[in-house]
Image: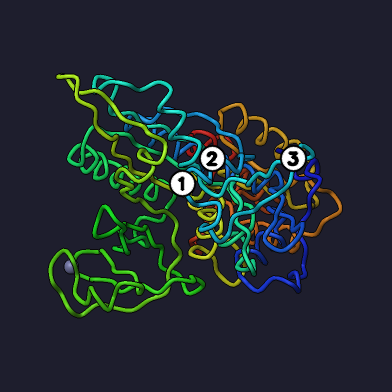
Amino acid sequence: MRQSFLFTRTSKESPKDETSYNARALVRAGFIDKVAAGIYTLLPLGLRVHQKICRIISEEMDAIGGQEVLMPALTPKESWQATGRWDSFGALFKLMGQDSREYALGATHEEIVTPLAKKFVFSYKELPVFIYQIQTKFRNEQRAKAGLLRGREFSMKDLYSFHTDKDDLSEFYKLAQKAYFRVFERCGLLDHTYLTFASGGEFSKYSHEFQTVTESGEDTIYVCGKCAIAVNEEIIEEQKACPNCGNKKLEKTKAVEVGNIFKLGTRFSRAFGFAYTDGEGGQHDVHMGCYGIGPSRLLGTIVEVYHDEKGMIWPDKVAPFKAHLIKVPGDHPGLSKAAEELYRNLEGAGIEVLYDDREDVSAGEKFADADLIGLPLRLVVSAKTMKKNSVEVKRRDEDKVELVALGEIVRRLS
Ligand SMILES: [Zn+2]
């Protein structure tokens, strides 16, 4: 994509009403636009990252048998009354329709997915089933802050699993944990993310969160250095040692909850009368689990973890483009032609490239923009590099600069 074509632009000023790093950097670099507190538009650069994160999540959910659906964001009051959550779910966005009926904007979808599965699943032969979606979710937060880390409207992948019994649920629960770690690995967050024990419910002692360590996190966790797992502060009084190895020297740190998984047991299947028939004709409640992960929150978290004083540093697999090609205005007859040709060749080879072809912008401003936007590779074509018939290559996360022959570079990046 040509940078001159982008309708968004970078800004030198940080937005004054944003306190979190992720919101300030993403707004400055033109990835997101703030509409109101906790409500953002994803701009072309931000949307590209979001789509990549969603694709990674979908692929990993499909790999463990997930079937994707899209449930409505607008949900009727009656569904929530069936589980008692119309009154007990504190952050539910409630609204009144012209038909004088009340609705909620979905904050989670157990109330929709359970009756949905009940329409198709009757026998043990049809279990287990794994249904997921990537949807916009709403939380009626008192105060929305921390940019994409805590919004009133945000994206969420929620998967729901349905099983004949506890053991089958436990087996899938472990499989889902592994799938989550593959997601974090591909998003570049594996080394910063801990499986964290949190409070369970009626059906299990614990639930599990995936917490990414960063100073800007709202949660406090206690990390076991030996096992790379952690305990959420909310249960540290009852769980003072590592649940895995018994280590009592846990390290307190701030973190962002980027995902969570929970054994729901029969809480929701009972509320909707969702039972199955076994081989002998007996009826049993279906066991359920739910598995959430927030793509928009992941996007903000990646920015919190990967940045320096100049701007963002995107991990390769979620960067909006792989390379930032910069044409530095200068005195060399072949410069423009060489830069254009390189851009076309990179695109032709399927390499995602943002091409800073702007004519009226200084080299210094272009470099500052490239650092702020933070694409993994910076390629510079200037009068100086043209003398050696080459392009200057630098990784965003390294200082080393290298000259590569113009004729070589596409092959090097492919
Ligand atoms: Zn441990």
Q: Secondary structure at mark 3?
A: loop
Dividing the image into four quarters, tell me where ligand 1 lies. Answer: bottom left
Query: Which residue, given by chain and number where applicable, does mark 2 sit on?
Result: 79
Position of the N terminus by quadrant: top right
Beta carbon of the mark 1 residue lies under 8 A of ligand 1:
no
Residue 350 rendering spot, x and y as whole percentages: 56, 29
Mark 2 → mark 1, Cα distance in angstroms:
7 Å
Beta carbon of the mark 2 residue lies under 8 A of ligand 1:
no
Q: Left or right: 34 with respect to 57?
A: right
Q: Residue visible at 54% across and 53% down?
A: 299
- For badge 3, the amino acid type reads Arg
1 vs 3, front mark: 1
Q: Do labels 2 and 1 touch, CB within 8 Å?
A: yes
Q: Residue furthest right?
A: 360
Q: Is residue 158 above or below residue 38?
A: above
Query: Which residue, given by chain and number where applicable, does mark 1 sit on?
Result: 83
- Which one is in front, 397 or 178? 178
Mark positioned earlier in the residue sequence (1 or 3): 3
Residue 332 rendering spot, x and y as whole percentages: 78, 47
Q: Secondary structure at mark 1?
A: helix
Is residue 320 in view? Answer: no
Q: Residue visible at 65% across and 74% down?
A: 19
In the figure, residue 244 lies in which quadrant? bottom left
- Which one is in front, 141 or 12? 141
Mark 1 → mark 3, Cα distance in angstroms:
52 Å
- Callout 1: few (<14), some (14-19), or many (20+) C-alpha neighbours within 10 Å? some
Q: Is residue 387 above or below residue 231?
A: above
- For badge 1, the amino acid type reads Thr
Mark positioned earlier in the residue sequence (3 or 2): 3
* Residue 2: image tag: 3
Q: Residue visible at 80% across and 42% down?
A: 333
